[in-house]
Amino acid sequence: VNPLVPGVMPAAPVLALDLGGSRIRAALVRLDGSLAARDEGRTRREAGPAAVIGDIVALLQAVRSRTPADAATRLAGVGIAAPGPLDPAAGRLIDTPNLGPAFRDADLAAPVSQALGLPVAVERDTNVALLGECGFGAARAARNAIYITVSTGVGGAVLADGRVLAGADGLAGEIGHVVLDLDGPPCGCGGRGHLESLSSGTGIARAAAELVAAGAAPGLSAVAAGSPDGLLSARDVAAAEEAGDPEARRVMERAREAFAGAMVGLVNVFNPEVIVVGGSVAHGQGERWLTPARTRVAAEAFRVQAARVRIVPATLGDDVGLVGALGLVACRIPGAVGR
Ligand SMILES: [Zn+2]
């Protein structure tokens, strides 16, 4: 498949769809990156891939039906952002932990293309997000950039020398699964001590639950006892830190420091101009999440790389996977490029 190169633009607007673990969003994306005819629904994972693809088609048809006729007749194609790992050449999911085993090897591009009569490009959500932030967000005009999302998991994408790093199988950029702690906690991928196991919402909640189970966190125990399901979320732990709870603070500091350590490695390996940080955990924490990363990079990364890099919040929010579809379609659908 063609490399993803920020700045390549389609000749006409595109339909965009962002398939997430809990929500499906769709919109028309105009050439200036603005969205129209936005629509969304729940991801009915439990109903299986055929039902979810039916929902995807219905959402895209609804968006197209609300697109002004002059734009609807000359759409450049459909860009779909989906959870990885996926096969962009085949337009197929591979094994997506966020959707479940029923979605293993599920075809995405072909059935959507057939139903809509439009060419479809499928790419991992973080690569599409990186394209979006490079085109219209916090990494505008960068040639070397990294996008990281910290939410339920930790995902990433790398722009190196002006193109999105693909790797041998189109799967490069899984920043959440670098090892930070050889003896660290288990990761959702089956590994141990990965960035995701330490800094994700899941990792934060798990670390807090362990302290509660050990009877070592009275404040967090009280919060857990007061929640409807008796469980702590990362949001609960962050709120408890805000309220002054010392164990919550320890858990959050560990998550922030693990993230900061990973940033040192990324700065040294990739020499990026900018690292764009998105996702609900990082967004909720704001500067509190980014400051330790900047401090640690300044102290530990190589001098020239550390002086070069900016570590900044993502600017496109929930729209990031939709806006990036513009570049995805331009790069991947033959004949879509404008002048
Ligand atoms: Zn992992």
Image (tube, rainbow, N blue to C red):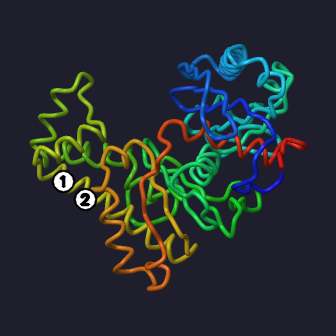
Q: Residue at x 45, y 67 (%)?
A: 310
208, above or below 22, in the image: below
Q: Amino acid at mark 1?
A: Arg
Which secondary structure lies at badge 1?
helix
Let me know if residue 100 appears in the view.
no
Residue that mark 1 sits on: 249
| Residue 123 position by quadrant | top right
Q: Is residue 329 left or right of residue 196?
A: right
Depth order, front residue of 20/247? 20
**Location of residue 142 in the rendering, given as x and y in whole percent from the top left corner:** 60, 64
Q: Residue at x 12, y 53 (%)?
A: 246
The x and y percentages for residue 106 are 74, 31
**Relative to 316, does residue 4 appear above or below in the rendering?**
below
Residue 229 image point, x, y percent: 27, 24
Confirm or reject: label 2 Cβ below 8 Å from ligand 1. no
Q: What residue appears at the point 16 percent right and 34 percent down from the top-left corner?
A: 223
- Closer to us: 66 or 120: 66
Badge 2 crowding class, 10 Å Cα cut-off, few under 14, some 14 to 19, many 20 or more, is: some
Above-or-below relation of 267 to 216: below
Residue 185: quadrant of the picture: bottom left
Query: Dot 2 corresponds to which residue?
Result: 253
Q: Residue at x 68, y 34 (%)?
A: 30
Report if residue 302 is visible in the image: yes
Distance CA(mark 2)–CA(mark 1): 6 Å
- Amino acid carrying label 2: it is Glu
In the image: residue 327, left or right of residue 333: left
- Give SS at disc 2: helix
Q: Are marks 2 and 1 in contact (CB under 8 Å)?
A: yes
